[in-house]
Image (cartoon, rainbow, N blue to C red):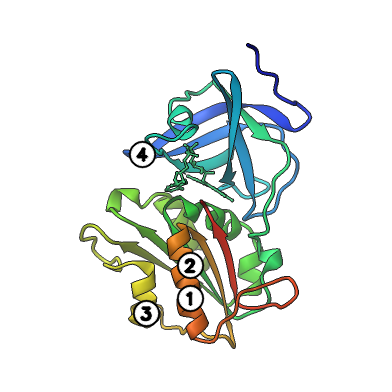
Amino acid sequence: MTVTVDTRKWSEGRVVERYRWAERLYSLRVEAEIEPFEAGQFGRLGLVVGDRFVSRPYSYVNAPDERPLDFYFIVIPDGVLTPRLARLQPGDSVWVARRAAGLFTLGQVPEGRHLWLLATGTALGPFLSILKTGTPWRRFEKIVLVHGVRTRAELAYWDTIESFRRAHGDRLRFFASVTREPCPGALPMRITQAIESGELERRAGLEIRPEDSQVMICGNPDMVRDTVALLKRRGLRENLRKQPGQITTERYW
Ligand SMILES: Cc1cc2nc3c(=O)[nH]c(=O)nc-3n(C[C@H](O)[C@H](O)[C@H](O)COP(=O)(O)OP(=O)(O)OC[C@H]3O[C@@H](n4cnc5c(N)ncnc54)[C@H](O)[C@@H]3O)c2cc1C
Protein backbone atom coordinates (compact mmCIF):
# COMPACT_ATOMS: atom_id res chain seq x y z
CA MET A 1 0.00 0.00 0.00
CA THR A 2 1.32 3.46 -0.82
CA VAL A 3 1.10 5.98 1.96
CA THR A 4 0.26 9.53 0.90
CA VAL A 5 1.75 12.33 2.91
CA ASP A 6 -0.14 15.65 2.97
CA THR A 7 2.40 18.02 1.43
CA ARG A 8 0.42 21.07 2.57
CA LYS A 9 1.37 20.12 6.13
CA TRP A 10 4.63 18.27 5.50
CA SER A 11 7.76 19.36 3.71
CA GLU A 12 10.09 16.74 2.25
CA GLY A 13 13.42 17.44 3.88
CA ARG A 14 16.92 16.18 3.04
CA VAL A 15 19.32 14.97 5.67
CA VAL A 16 22.58 16.88 5.33
CA GLU A 17 24.33 15.41 8.37
CA ARG A 18 23.83 12.72 10.95
CA TYR A 19 26.10 13.21 13.94
CA ARG A 20 26.52 10.60 16.65
CA TRP A 21 27.40 12.01 20.09
CA ALA A 22 27.16 8.84 22.13
CA GLU A 23 25.78 5.34 21.84
CA ARG A 24 22.13 6.40 21.51
CA LEU A 25 22.43 10.16 21.00
CA TYR A 26 22.26 11.74 17.58
CA SER A 27 21.81 15.06 15.86
CA LEU A 28 20.09 15.14 12.54
CA ARG A 29 20.67 18.18 10.36
CA VAL A 30 18.04 18.67 7.74
CA GLU A 31 17.30 21.10 4.91
CA ALA A 32 13.57 21.61 4.59
CA GLU A 33 11.20 24.43 3.78
CA ILE A 34 9.28 25.33 6.88
CA GLU A 35 7.34 28.30 8.16
CA PRO A 36 9.04 30.70 10.59
CA PHE A 37 9.21 29.48 14.18
CA GLU A 38 10.16 30.90 17.58
CA ALA A 39 13.17 29.69 19.56
CA GLY A 40 12.00 27.04 22.04
CA GLN A 41 9.29 25.65 19.76
CA PHE A 42 9.22 22.15 18.31
CA GLY A 43 8.65 20.78 14.85
CA ARG A 44 7.78 17.22 13.88
CA LEU A 45 9.80 14.63 12.00
CA GLY A 46 8.00 11.91 10.10
CA LEU A 47 8.79 8.77 8.14
CA VAL A 48 6.70 6.20 6.36
CA VAL A 49 6.97 3.03 8.42
CA GLY A 50 5.44 0.05 6.63
CA ASP A 51 1.94 1.09 5.67
CA ARG A 52 1.66 4.13 7.94
CA PHE A 53 3.08 7.57 8.41
CA VAL A 54 4.70 8.02 11.83
CA SER A 55 5.68 11.39 13.25
CA ARG A 56 6.90 12.71 16.61
CA PRO A 57 7.65 16.17 18.00
CA TYR A 58 11.29 17.35 18.18
CA SER A 59 12.52 20.70 19.46
CA TYR A 60 14.56 22.85 17.12
CA VAL A 61 18.14 23.24 18.30
CA ASN A 62 18.96 25.74 15.58
CA ALA A 63 18.03 29.39 16.01
CA PRO A 64 15.04 30.53 13.92
CA ASP A 65 17.29 32.18 11.33
CA GLU A 66 19.86 29.39 11.23
CA ARG A 67 20.00 26.56 8.68
CA PRO A 68 20.14 23.59 8.39
CA LEU A 69 17.46 22.64 10.88
CA ASP A 70 19.03 20.78 13.78
CA PHE A 71 17.29 18.08 15.82
CA TYR A 72 18.85 16.32 18.79
CA PHE A 73 17.38 12.98 19.79
CA ILE A 74 17.91 9.83 21.75
CA VAL A 75 17.19 6.41 20.31
CA ILE A 76 14.49 4.57 22.22
CA PRO A 77 15.55 0.96 21.54
CA ASP A 78 12.02 -0.34 21.01
CA GLY A 79 10.66 3.02 19.87
CA VAL A 80 8.85 3.30 16.56
CA LEU A 81 10.55 6.33 15.03
CA THR A 82 13.93 6.97 16.65
CA PRO A 83 15.77 3.76 15.61
CA ARG A 84 14.76 4.65 12.03
CA LEU A 85 15.82 8.29 12.35
CA ALA A 86 19.21 7.10 13.59
CA ARG A 87 19.71 5.04 10.42
CA LEU A 88 19.17 7.97 8.06
CA GLN A 89 22.19 9.04 6.01
CA PRO A 90 23.05 12.30 4.24
CA GLY A 91 20.88 12.59 1.13
CA ASP A 92 17.99 10.58 2.63
CA SER A 93 14.60 12.18 2.87
CA VAL A 94 12.66 12.84 6.06
CA TRP A 95 9.34 14.66 6.42
CA VAL A 96 9.32 17.84 8.47
CA ALA A 97 6.13 19.57 9.62
CA ARG A 98 5.84 22.92 7.88
CA ARG A 99 4.42 24.59 10.98
CA ALA A 100 6.11 24.60 14.39
CA ALA A 101 4.16 24.44 17.64
CA GLY A 102 4.60 24.95 21.35
CA LEU A 103 4.55 27.68 23.97
CA PHE A 104 7.94 26.92 25.51
CA THR A 105 9.35 30.24 24.35
CA LEU A 106 10.66 33.41 25.99
CA GLY A 107 7.56 35.17 24.70
CA GLN A 108 5.65 33.25 27.38
CA VAL A 109 8.14 34.04 30.16
CA PRO A 110 7.49 37.13 32.32
CA GLU A 111 10.19 39.61 33.20
CA GLY A 112 12.93 38.75 35.66
CA ARG A 113 16.61 39.41 36.37
CA HIS A 114 17.86 35.85 36.33
CA LEU A 115 16.85 33.10 33.95
CA TRP A 116 17.32 29.49 35.05
CA LEU A 117 17.23 26.88 32.28
CA LEU A 118 17.01 23.30 33.55
CA ALA A 119 17.18 20.39 31.08
CA THR A 120 17.56 16.65 31.16
CA GLY A 121 19.11 14.81 28.20
CA THR A 122 17.95 15.90 24.78
CA ALA A 123 15.81 18.67 26.28
CA LEU A 124 18.93 20.83 26.17
CA GLY A 125 17.91 21.51 22.55
CA PRO A 126 15.25 24.22 22.97
CA PHE A 127 17.52 26.12 25.39
CA LEU A 128 20.33 26.18 22.84
CA SER A 129 17.95 27.59 20.25
CA ILE A 130 16.83 30.26 22.74
CA LEU A 131 20.40 31.14 23.78
CA LYS A 132 21.48 31.49 20.15
CA THR A 133 19.09 34.44 19.81
CA GLY A 134 19.65 37.92 21.25
CA THR A 135 16.45 37.95 23.34
CA PRO A 136 17.56 36.24 26.56
CA TRP A 137 20.72 38.36 26.66
CA ARG A 138 18.72 41.56 26.27
CA ARG A 139 16.12 40.57 28.85
CA PHE A 140 18.12 38.90 31.65
CA GLU A 141 21.22 39.93 33.58
CA LYS A 142 22.38 36.40 34.35
CA ILE A 143 21.46 33.05 32.82
CA VAL A 144 22.10 29.70 34.47
CA LEU A 145 21.96 26.65 32.21
CA VAL A 146 21.91 23.18 33.78
CA HIS A 147 22.19 20.00 31.72
CA GLY A 148 21.35 16.77 33.54
CA VAL A 149 22.78 13.55 32.06
CA ARG A 150 23.86 10.12 33.25
CA THR A 151 27.35 9.93 31.75
CA ARG A 152 29.98 12.40 30.51
CA ALA A 153 29.60 11.11 26.96
CA GLU A 154 26.05 12.46 27.00
CA LEU A 155 27.25 16.05 27.45
CA ALA A 156 26.55 17.06 23.88
CA TYR A 157 26.82 20.49 22.25
CA TRP A 158 29.77 21.42 24.45
CA ASP A 159 31.21 23.64 21.71
CA THR A 160 27.94 25.53 21.33
CA ILE A 161 27.84 26.20 25.07
CA GLU A 162 31.49 27.30 24.93
CA SER A 163 30.60 29.77 22.18
CA PHE A 164 27.93 31.31 24.46
CA ARG A 165 30.52 31.61 27.20
CA ARG A 166 32.94 33.32 24.85
CA ALA A 167 30.25 35.75 23.71
CA HIS A 168 28.65 36.50 27.08
CA GLY A 169 31.35 35.78 29.70
CA ASP A 170 30.11 35.30 33.23
CA ARG A 171 26.56 36.32 32.42
CA LEU A 172 26.19 32.62 31.60
CA ARG A 173 26.77 30.00 34.27
CA PHE A 174 26.73 26.48 32.88
CA PHE A 175 26.53 23.38 35.06
CA ALA A 176 26.48 19.78 34.01
CA SER A 177 24.80 17.38 36.41
CA VAL A 178 26.25 13.91 35.83
CA THR A 179 24.66 11.19 37.92
CA ARG A 180 26.20 7.83 37.02
CA GLU A 181 29.94 8.45 36.89
CA PRO A 182 32.45 10.98 38.20
CA CYS A 183 32.95 14.01 35.97
CA PRO A 184 35.36 16.74 37.06
CA GLY A 185 33.60 20.04 37.67
CA ALA A 186 30.10 18.62 37.25
CA LEU A 187 27.43 18.46 39.93
CA PRO A 188 27.54 14.79 41.01
CA MET A 189 23.80 14.64 41.63
CA ARG A 190 20.43 15.06 40.00
CA ILE A 191 19.11 18.53 39.23
CA THR A 192 16.47 18.16 41.95
CA GLN A 193 19.11 17.25 44.55
CA ALA A 194 21.32 20.11 43.39
CA ILE A 195 18.45 22.52 44.07
CA GLU A 196 17.29 20.89 47.29
CA SER A 197 20.77 20.83 48.80
CA GLY A 198 21.47 24.43 47.75
CA GLU A 199 24.56 23.28 45.82
CA LEU A 200 23.43 24.65 42.47
CA GLU A 201 22.76 28.11 43.88
CA ARG A 202 26.01 28.06 45.87
CA ARG A 203 27.98 27.34 42.72
CA ALA A 204 25.99 29.81 40.64
CA GLY A 205 26.31 32.52 43.30
CA LEU A 206 22.60 33.29 42.78
CA GLU A 207 19.39 32.33 44.50
CA ILE A 208 16.26 30.95 42.89
CA ARG A 209 13.58 33.21 44.35
CA PRO A 210 10.21 34.57 43.26
CA GLU A 211 11.28 38.25 43.26
CA ASP A 212 13.79 38.05 40.45
CA SER A 213 13.98 34.54 38.96
CA GLN A 214 12.32 32.92 35.98
CA VAL A 215 12.80 29.17 35.61
CA MET A 216 12.26 27.12 32.45
CA ILE A 217 12.28 23.35 32.89
CA CYS A 218 12.29 20.80 30.07
CA GLY A 219 12.62 17.06 29.60
CA ASN A 220 11.95 14.00 31.70
CA PRO A 221 8.44 14.33 33.17
CA ASP A 222 9.53 13.08 36.61
CA MET A 223 12.28 15.69 36.80
CA VAL A 224 9.86 18.39 35.65
CA ARG A 225 7.25 17.36 38.24
CA ASP A 226 9.72 17.07 41.12
CA THR A 227 11.46 20.32 40.29
CA VAL A 228 8.17 22.20 40.05
CA ALA A 229 7.15 20.81 43.46
CA LEU A 230 10.48 21.90 44.97
CA LEU A 231 10.25 25.40 43.54
CA LYS A 232 6.67 25.80 44.67
CA ARG A 233 7.82 25.14 48.22
CA ARG A 234 10.12 28.14 47.74
CA GLY A 235 7.22 30.38 46.79
CA LEU A 236 7.55 30.25 42.99
CA ARG A 237 4.41 29.68 40.95
CA GLU A 238 3.68 28.04 37.64
CA ASN A 239 3.38 30.50 34.84
CA LEU A 240 -0.18 30.29 33.57
CA ARG A 241 -1.77 32.44 30.90
CA LYS A 242 -4.25 33.93 33.37
CA GLN A 243 -1.79 34.19 36.21
CA PRO A 244 1.86 34.88 35.37
CA GLY A 245 4.34 33.07 37.56
CA GLN A 246 8.00 32.07 37.53
CA ILE A 247 7.98 28.44 36.33
CA THR A 248 7.51 27.51 32.66
CA THR A 249 7.69 23.82 31.71
CA GLU A 250 7.70 21.36 28.83
CA ARG A 251 7.53 17.59 29.21
CA TYR A 252 9.00 15.33 26.53
CA TRP A 253 6.74 12.35 27.26
C1 LIG B 1 7.06 18.89 22.84
C2 LIG B 1 7.99 17.71 22.67
C3 LIG B 1 9.26 17.91 22.17
C4 LIG B 1 10.14 16.83 22.05
N1 LIG B 1 11.41 17.04 21.60
C5 LIG B 1 12.29 16.02 21.60
C6 LIG B 1 13.66 16.24 21.23
O1 LIG B 1 14.08 17.36 20.86
N2 LIG B 1 14.51 15.16 21.29
C7 LIG B 1 14.08 13.93 21.68
O2 LIG B 1 14.92 12.99 21.74
N3 LIG B 1 12.80 13.69 22.01
C8 LIG B 1 11.89 14.70 21.96
N4 LIG B 1 10.60 14.45 22.27
C9 LIG B 1 10.16 13.04 22.42
C10 LIG B 1 9.84 12.49 21.00
O3 LIG B 1 8.72 13.17 20.48
C11 LIG B 1 9.51 10.98 20.99
O4 LIG B 1 8.62 10.66 22.04
C12 LIG B 1 10.76 10.13 21.13
O5 LIG B 1 11.72 10.46 20.16
C13 LIG B 1 10.44 8.63 21.03
O6 LIG B 1 9.93 8.31 19.76
P1 LIG B 1 9.85 6.79 19.32
O7 LIG B 1 8.80 6.68 18.22
O8 LIG B 1 11.19 6.23 18.97
O9 LIG B 1 9.37 6.04 20.62
P2 LIG B 1 7.90 5.63 21.06
O10 LIG B 1 7.59 4.31 20.52
O11 LIG B 1 6.95 6.72 20.76
O12 LIG B 1 8.17 5.53 22.66
C14 LIG B 1 7.94 6.64 23.51
C15 LIG B 1 8.61 6.41 24.86
O13 LIG B 1 9.99 6.71 24.77
C16 LIG B 1 10.46 7.36 25.95
N5 LIG B 1 11.03 8.68 25.57
C17 LIG B 1 10.51 9.55 24.67
N6 LIG B 1 11.32 10.62 24.53
C18 LIG B 1 12.38 10.42 25.30
C19 LIG B 1 13.54 11.18 25.54
N7 LIG B 1 13.79 12.35 24.92
N8 LIG B 1 14.44 10.69 26.44
C20 LIG B 1 14.23 9.51 27.04
N9 LIG B 1 13.13 8.72 26.85
C21 LIG B 1 12.21 9.18 25.98
C22 LIG B 1 9.26 7.48 26.87
O14 LIG B 1 9.27 6.40 27.75
C23 LIG B 1 8.10 7.39 25.94
O15 LIG B 1 6.94 6.89 26.56
C24 LIG B 1 9.71 15.52 22.40
C25 LIG B 1 8.41 15.34 22.86
C26 LIG B 1 7.56 16.41 23.02
C27 LIG B 1 6.17 16.17 23.56
Between marks 3 and 2 in the image, the one whose residue lies nearer the viewer: 2
The residue under the point 68% across, 47% down is: 65
When the figure is inspected, residue 224 is found, relative to residue 78, above or below; the finding is below
Task: Give the labeled residue for mark 4.
Answer: 24
Between marks 4 and 2 in the image, the one whose residue lies nearer the viewer: 2
Identified by mark 2, the residue type is Arg
The residue at the far top in this view is 1
Task: Give the labeled residue for mark 2.
Answer: 225
Identified by mark 1, the residue type is Ala
Circle 1: is it few (<14), some (14-19), or many (20+) Cα within 10 Å? some
Q: Earlier in the sequence, mark 3 or mark 2?
A: 3
Circle 4: is it few (<14), some (14-19), or many (20+) Cα within 10 Å? some
Q: Position of residue 95 (x, y in %)?
A: 63, 29
Identified by mark 3, the residue type is Glu
Displayed quadrant of residue 19: top left
**Label 4 to label 1: alpha-carbon separation:** 30 Å
The residue under the point 48% across, 76% down is: 229
Mark 1: secondary structure = helix
Identified by mark 4, the residue type is Arg
When the figure is inspected, residue 153 is found, relative to residue 20, above or below; the finding is below
Q: Earlier in the sequence, mark 1 or mark 3?
A: 3
Circle 2: is it few (<14), some (14-19), or many (20+) Cα within 10 Å? some
